[in-house]
Amino acid sequence: MKKVTINDIAKKLGVTPSTISRALADNKRVSLKTREMVKKVAKEMGYQPNLMAASLRKGRSDLVGMIVPRINRHFFSNVISGVEEILNPAGYSLLIMQSHEKLRSEVKAVNSLMQNRVAGIITSISSETDDFGHFQYVVDSKVPLVQFDRVSKELTGAKVVNDNYTGAYLATKKLLESGYRRVAHFGGSRLLKAYCERRRGYEDAVKDYFGKVDEGLIMEDVITREAGYLKVKEVAKEGIDAVFCAGDYSAFGVYEGLKELGISISKEFGVAGFGNEPFAEMIYPTLSSVEQQGSEMGRMVARQMIDAINGSGHNIEIVVPVKYIDRDSSGKVL
Amino acid sequence: MKKVTINDIAKKLGVTPSTISRALADNKRVSLKTREMVKKVAKEMGYQPNLMAASLRKGRSDLVGMIVPRINRHFFSNVISGVEEILNPAGYSLLIMQSHEKLRSEVKAVNSLMQNRVAGIITSISSETDDFGHFQYVVDSKVPLVQFDRVSKELTGAKVVNDNYTGAYLATKKLLESGYRRVAHFGGSRLLKAYCERRRGYEDAVKDYFGKVDEGLIMEDVITREAGYLKVKEVAKEGIDAVFCAGDYSAFGVYEGLKELGISISKEFGVAGFGNEPFAEMIYPTLSSVEQQGSEMGRMVARQMIDAINGSGHNIEIVVPVKYIDRDSSGKVL
DNA sequence: TTGTATGCGTTATCAC
DNA sequence: GTGATAACGCATACAA
């Protein structure tokens, strides 16, 4: 089955390819009658436009590239889903790549996308990335770049981030109001703004409550389940009675450590996480957490991208609200 | 910054575009000296090949399409990850679309991918799909189609599936050996082979143990958390003392129902799931489940696709082994 | 309202 | 070992 082209249709109808091209594009300069006829015949012949040819001709494709650290992370896959929700109906398809948190992969991904002449690139920067040359190249090439979650101030273009600060503030505040006195913070990498913001939220909440913050209660790079487990076993004996974790996985590690120590979560020790992973409401006791609205974020990102592609892009940072979900782990009710 | 083409390089070096094209492709017919020179200059000039042009000319692209029901499902995102792991180094990029379990979206996705002239399509069929015309069209167009997990016998091409049967058999067997006497099955849609296989595994395990299976213990379309919750409340009073669920989410629903009924999981009522979602080992008691090796599956799928693209495709069904993970919910030890 | 001509950037088939 | 030329399928500026 040979692919049918507009030339084939043209021949069949006794007109020229240009007419077919215009008719299929619903160009008003073609009579309605011809347009309908062309579309009918095109369908009958099983015509499928060759988007590569069209893109080559037009100098731009309907492909949008997306680079995320890992696709199989709840948050990222939700964002992807939200992006598709808007981009697909708008006629764009998503070319997805993973950086696996590696700069090298990220650079490769950017090159691959650029070679595919994508209409734009959406990305959440790898945690390892400290050089932005590859993304600068994108910007310099006038290819719209929209960043989300993990963004760099060095790069121009739209940025969409979570309100990490407020989420962290609310989670910490609740722990304090529940009566816990020494609330620690298990944070993430200082290199990523998202984690800095969460730390700031924690600090401000503590400051607003106590007037000052004890730096000794802040531990950085405690972001995995394993790290949370080890760290809580190390510090729980030191009078700490609650912890706001910058991620749900480390919060779960904290659960494991506390259970092993025979310390009752909630009753004796408060815990709050960030991310609202599916398991947060499934574990015992249920984990208070901050929900990042992944798909909502994806939709915002997609809209920014469409604007940028249409030349009406803004160089702004959009803050998507988060939702603090209060559950049992941060109350003293149990 | 105008895009630099092979013509620009040719002009700069005083040779013709053909030579540049050949040199960049490492064609032996051009002298080593020239090849090196061309590559050097190309890099200096910041040349990025235009893959759309190359694809148009060659009649095939380096894009592989992938259609999954939902990207933000643990299993599917793992498969995607595995596929990328193999496909990217091989020079292919993934064009991903979601069907959201809707036939209409699936058809649209197929058309979109075909219009982008993908080199092949990887898919896990939507649960709603009962007509395969769109995929048949792919096959007829000689575009390699590789199916995984949810496959249809009606379509030729490589298929990669989990060993659903054995996983279900082992999970059920363990429940029986733990001493539960009336083990029910909460299954999925009868339309999907994966669920049929799980049901078969359950049935055979029960048959091997009791000599016969009580059809009354099998409930279909109980696959969501909500459904599991409702169904277990409905049947727990009827003497059933264990259930093998075709999915972890319904198993969690069962947990919720049992807790509400004051029935002790494991001690009084055994539960096993399928999928080994991250939460399975985080909930209380830990949930026995069957692990589907998503990324391994993805890698197999990708290899089949590459073979198919290279013309050495096989029309086979590959069964990827699963791993039954025995945890607390299916023992009577607690 | 339709046709003509040209080019998008690349590769492949001839020549030389 | 390199060059000239055509073609992939489509869209558009310009003519008619």
Image (tube, coloured by chain):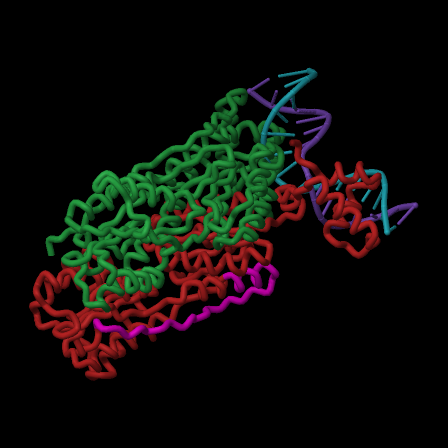
Chain colours: A green, B red, C purple, D cyan
Q: Nearer the viewer, residue B239 or A145?
A: A145
Q: Nearer the viewer, residue B60 or B29?
A: B29
Q: Is residue A207 visible?
A: yes
Q: Which residues are magenta?
A: B302-329
Q: Is residue A65 above or below residue B332?
A: above
Quarter of image, res B250: bottom left
Query: Where is residue C8 drawn, in percent x and y?
Result: 67, 34
Q: Is residue B247 visible?
A: no
Query: Where is residue A109 drawn, in percent x and y?
Result: 55, 48
Query: Where is residue B38 drawn, in percent x and y?
Result: 77, 46
Residue shown at 43%/71% (left/top)? B319
Quarter of image, res B80: bottom left
| Quadrant of the drawing holding the N terminus of chain B | top right
Relative placement, left or right, of A245 versus B138 is left
Q: Is residue A45 above or below residue A98?
A: above
* Magenta run includes residue B327: yes
Query: Where is residue A330 drawn, in percent x and y?
Result: 19, 51
* Magenta run includes residue B280: no
Relative placement, left or right, of B170 versus B25 is left
Numbered-mark total: 0
Q: Nearer the viewer, residue A241 or A270?
A: A241
